[in-house]
Image (tube, rainbow, N blue to C red):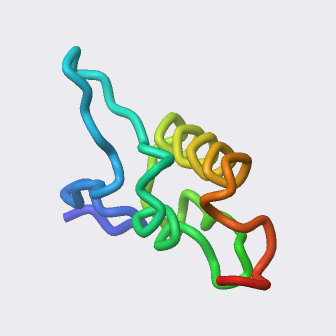
Amino acid sequence: MARGYGSESRKSAYLKTDTRGRSYVDYRSVDELRRLMTPNGKIYSRKRLGTSASEQRMVAQAVKRARFMGLLPYTSATL
């Protein structure tokens, strides 16, 4: 029984799989991305989310894309 912060058996709901079998995080799924952020608009850490390093990079890139497209705010004024 492993005692750690992340759970290996937990399936990431925000990870999608394309037709080639590659995983990605969809920047258009705003509700799922808001669950990965603090109320102030910061992205939660890997320790809190239980993601690997590559998954965390995908999450950060998706949040940044959503912010740039205007789907997510940069600040907490409208959260």
Query: Residue 54 location in percent, x, y?
Result: 51, 34
Residue at 53%, 48% (x, y): give it.
59
Q: Quadrant of residue 61?
A: top right
Rendered-image quadrant of the N terminus: bottom left
Q: Quadrant of residue 76?
A: bottom right
Above or below, 22 against 71 in this view is: above
Residue at 22%, 55% (x, y): give it.
11
Query: Residue 57 location in percent, x, y?
Result: 59, 39
The residue closer to the viewer here, 1 or 69, is 69
Query: Residue 22 location in percent, x, y?
Result: 30, 23
Outermost residue to the top: 20
Residue at 56%, 45% (x, y): give it.
62
Q: How many marks?
A: 0
Above or below, 77 against 1 in this view is: below
Outermost residue to the front: 70
Q: Is residue 31 left or right of residue 65?
A: left
Rendered-image quadrant of the C terminus: bottom right
Query: Residue 3 location in percent, x, y?
Result: 33, 68
Q: Quadrant of residue 74?
A: bottom right
Residue at 23%, 60% (x, y): give it.
10
Q: Is residue 55 left or right of residue 70?
A: left
